[in-house]
Amino acid sequence: MTKTIYILNGPNLNLLGKRQPEIYGHDTLDDVERNCAAVAAEFGLSIRLLQSNWEGQIIDWIHEARENAAGIVINPAAFTHTSVAILDALNTFDGPVVEVHISQVHKREAFRHHSYVSQRADAVMAGFGIDGYALATRHLGGLLAG
C-alpha cells in the first residue's frame, strides 16, 4: 500500500494565484498539487491535497489523517495564529508534520509572528513561495523513507 501525505490548506488559499499576488505569487493550488505529487512519487508516496475555509473541516481531516496518512504538510493560513483547536488535533497525529507559509511571515505584521502550529510541527517552511510545499514534501519523503 502506498503511503500518503496529507497537504492541508486553510482559509483563502482557494484564491491562491488571484489574491494578493504581490505577496503570494501567481501560482495556484493546482500548481502546488502537481509539484508535490511529483516529489512524493520520487519516494513512492502519494498526496492528498485539501483546502477549507472552515476550521472544523481542517480538524476533521487531521483526524482522518490519523488513520490514512504517514505525514502532514499544513499551511493553516490565518488559523496559524489563532487555532489552539488545530494544534490539539495535530497533537493527536503520530506522524511527522511540516508547517508551510508561502510568505516570509516574520517580515509581515507582528500578529503573524506567532504560530500555535509550530508547537507541534517537526519543521517550518516560510518565505519559499509555493516551493515550500515541495520542500516540505521532500523532507517528509526523506523522513518516511528512513
Image (cartoon, grey):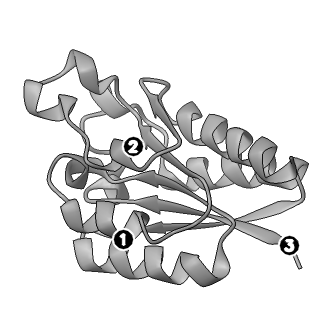
Give the residue type that dot 1 points to. Answer: Ala
Residue wearing tag 2? 17
Give the residue type that dot 2 points to. Answer: Gly
Q: Residues within 10 Å of mark 1 (few under 14, many from 20)?
A: some
Label 3 and label 1: CA atoms lie apart by 24 Å
Q: Residues within 10 Å of mark 3 (few under 14, many from 20)?
A: few
Q: Earlier in the sequence, mark 3 or mark 1?
A: 3
Quadrant of the rendered image containing residue 7: bottom right
Q: What element does badge 3 sit on?
A: loop
Q: Residues within 10 Å of mark 2 (few under 14, many from 20)?
A: some
Residue wearing tag 3? 2
Q: What element does badge 1 sit on?
A: helix
Q: Indicate the position of residue 45 as horizontal and vertical percent values.
A: 82, 61
Residue 1, above or below 112: below
Q: Earlier in the sequence, mark 2 or mark 1?
A: 2
Give yes or no for contact between labels 2 and 1 (Cβ–Cβ under 8 Å).
Answer: no
